[in-house]
Image (cartoon, rainbow, N blue to C red):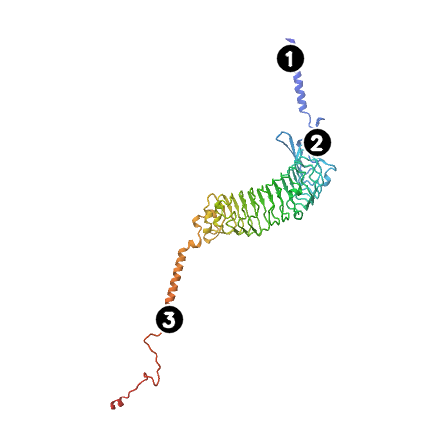
Amino acid sequence: MNRTALLLFVLVGCCLQVLRAEEEEELAPATDAPADVRVVVSHLCHFKKPLQDPTDLDEDQYCDCDVHNSPTGLPEVQIDCRKHQLGDGFWQESSEQLPQGTVRLDLSRNALTVVPRLVGEQLRYLNLGHNQITTIPDKVFGNVSLLEELDLSSNRIEMLGTDALAGLPNLKLIDLSSNLIAKIEVNAFSNALHLSQLKLSNNSLGAFFNRTEADLYLRLGVTNRLAVLEMERCNLTDINLSSGVGLERALLGYNRLQQLSKLPKQLAYLDISGTPIRSLPAKFLPHLLHLESLILQDMPILYTLEEYALYGLPRLSMLNLQGSRNLSTIHPHIFGQNVIRNETDTELKRLILKGTNIRTLNSTLQFAFENLRLLDIRGAPLRCDCQLRWLRELPNLMTLGVCVKPNALRDKRFGTIDPHQFQCRAEQFWIYTVFNVLLAILLIILVSIGIFLIVRAIRPKPHVQLRTVGANSPYARVTIEPNRAEIL
């Protein structure tokens, strides 16, 4: 019994020592950090521990760095350096080593004039927009090979070299809009094998493309993976996209385009807003069998959509003409001369005529509007008469607009007016018209009778003869003296 009690006492003592040691380790002062835990200080971020406890103090020299867990459970770092006044002298001479796990870096609005050389094995999103960068050195992005999105918009870049994007095989989106780019060297995008979105809007590329007249894909080395192309306000007069078999969306608005005959057949979305086109002639667009959306907003001198203008677009479901304030005529056979005989199929579901000068629509369009679900004609001077009754009677159609004429329906919403109220003047006032005609005939008859009576009254009667009265006239005055008569 004594030996057993002694063993129990020894075991209890050992357990108490272990527990006391663990408590002392937990209660150790925070200032006395263990030797194996080092404080990580990045040039951009400050972490007390590796990828933990980011220090984001206002008005310090570091960016805003956040740590999140990825779907795989690994930590990901997102660095936001917007408006941190990081000049060119901030960066190290050779390259900037990003914290481990950095996937997103925003360096926009820092007045940078050169592209910093970054090293980051996991960086996928880089924003260098709204700086003063003038050139992109060759292979400057070679150490961020996993980059997927690159934003260089709103800088002062004048030329894009062949090797500027070298080392970016995974790049999917590049934004070069709002620069001063006037020249792009041959195969400048050939290194971006997975490029799917290219934004070149607001650059002076008109003279460059107009001079070369080459296919954009063949000239720039763009692959068929490109699905979205944005080239608005580039001063283009023509563009060749024939080789873009994978292109789905093309934004070409606010250029000087007069015709578009070299477009890929797979195109599903086309925006040519703001172009100086006076009228859409027959078959203005090639047979785009997959085109679903056509945007023609703010066309300054567009007056009419002619016959067959939208022929050969069987999948067109949305047509937007908003802001084309001079558009006043839509030809009844815009989709084809005989839609009812299935000369062409239409799937139009949304038609935007907001802010145009459309007053009426011909009833021949009824067959093309069978699938229409939304018609927006707000701001148009609608004449809500019998010629638009067919539009009001279409089932499942929501029409947004306000009537301007006639006065009886002025300022009333189109969709709230009953179909029988859409009347023309001839229908609405036929009784008055008949009455006026009869009154006019009666007046003519009365006037004729009056003239006849006046003429007859002033003419002499038939038995009255007018003879001359004189000295030798048998009707001369005879005076018989009474005395002489008695003598006789």
Q: Position of residue 437 (x, y in %)?
A: 40, 60
The amino acid at mark 2 is: Val
Q: Gap in Å between the C-alphas at discs 1 and 2?
A: 48 Å
Q: Position of residue 147 (x, y in %)?
A: 66, 36
Q: The residue tagged with tag 2: helix, strand or loop?
A: strand
Residue 431, located in which quarter of the rendered image?
bottom left
Q: Earlier in the sequence, mark 1 or mark 3?
A: 1
Residue 188, which numbered label?
Answer: none
Q: Contact (CB < 8 A) between labels 1 and 3?
A: no
Q: Is residue 116 left or right of residue 445?
A: right
Q: Is residue 222 left or right of residue 458?
A: right
Query: Quarter of the image containing the C terminus?
Result: bottom left
Query: Quarter of the image containing the N terminus?
Result: top right
Q: Gap in Å between the C-alphas at discs 1 and 3?
A: 156 Å
Q: Which residue is mark 2?
A: 40
Q: Is residue 152 visible?
A: no
The nearer-to-camera label among 2 and 3 is: 3
Q: Position of residue 315 (x, y in %)?
A: 53, 42
Q: Which residue is mark 1?
A: 8
The amino acid at mark 3 is: Val
Q: The residue tagged with tag 1: helix, strand or loop?
A: helix
The amino acid at mark 1 is: Leu
Work out whether residue 3 or residue 129 is closer to the camera in this orientation and state it. 129
Work out whether residue 430 or residue 190 is closer to the camera in this orientation and state it. 190
User: In the image, what residue occupies the spot 66% across and 21% down?
Assistant: 22
Q: Which residue is mark 3?
A: 455
